[in-house]
Image: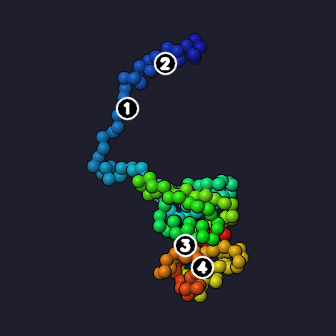
Amino acid sequence: RPLTSYLGTLLPVVKQLCVNCQPTSPPRSPQDNSQQQTTSKMVRMSVLADCLKTISNAEKRGRRQVMVRPSSKVVIKFLQCMQQHGYIGEFEIVDDHRSNKIVIELNGRLNKCGVISPRFDVGYDDIEKWIVNLLPSRQFGHIMISTTYGIMTHEEARRKKTGGKILGFFY
């Protein structure tokens, strides 16, 4: 007899066995409860880094508008400085009863923006070293520094003769 005829007679029997037998889990011991697997949720490490990366990607794609979420006070201050220097257009904060969204108008002037992580301490004397390392030229681009006087560009920090923690850059 060919093999297919044997399979034809066994198939209904196997199906019946599968329907009747429900899989059961083995009994658990008290030690197993402490080792239960939990599903992990991704955590957003840096809101500012995500925002700047989203803006940079949208600018590379040639988009006219981009939506970033969530927002924070640091992100808003960073965007205000970018807007003052003409690298982005208007932006609008949309309240979604969570952590807000920001809709940003892009004007095509932004070449690159990024975050410096970790936020290194930058003394007044060290600002020049960071300018040389991060920016393409002296007349071009800005470094954002969080100082005791607030978040400002490296030029403002030099005028006020203060240092702080470096946040990021844009040019």
Q: Report the amino acid beneath label 1.
A: Pro
According to the image, label 1 marks what residue?
Answer: 23
Which residue occupies 49% across, 77% down? 150
Label pair 2/1, CB-CB below 8 angstroms: no
Task: Name the spot of residue 81 as percent of width and height, x first.
Answer: 57, 70
> Whole-Å distance between the Cαs marked 4 and 1?
66 Å
Q: Residues within 10 Å of mark 1 (few under 14, many from 20)?
A: few
> Whole-Å distance between the Cαs marked 4 and 3?
11 Å
Judging from the image, what secondary structure is the residue with disc 2 in? Answer: helix
The numbered dot on residue 154 is: 4
According to the image, label 3 marks what residue?
Answer: 167
Q: Point out the frontmost of discs 4 and 1.
A: 4
Q: Report the amino acid beneath label 2.
A: Leu
Q: Report the amino acid beneath label 3.
A: Leu
> Whole-Å distance between the Cαs marked 3 and 1?
55 Å
Q: Residues within 10 Å of mark 2 (few under 14, many from 20)?
A: few
Q: Nearer the viewer, residue 63 or 86?
A: 86
Which residue occupies 44% across, 57% down? 99
Residue 126, picture quadrant: bottom right
> Whole-Å distance between the Cαs marked 3 and 2?
67 Å
Q: Is residue 157 above or below residue 43?
A: below
Q: Point out the frontmost of discs 2 and 4.
A: 4
According to the image, label 2 marks what residue?
Answer: 11
Judging from the image, what secondary structure is the residue with disc 1 in? Answer: loop
Q: Point out the frontmost of discs 3 and 2.
A: 3
Q: Earlier in the sequence, mark 3 or mark 2?
A: 2
Q: Earlier in the sequence, mark 4 or mark 3?
A: 4
**Where the C terminus falls, by quadrant?**
bottom right
Task: Name the spot of residue 138 as percent of width and height, x first.
Answer: 70, 79
Q: Earlier in the sequence, mark 2 or mark 4?
A: 2
Judging from the image, what secondary structure is the residue with disc 3 in? Answer: strand
Which residue occupies 63% across, 59% down? 106
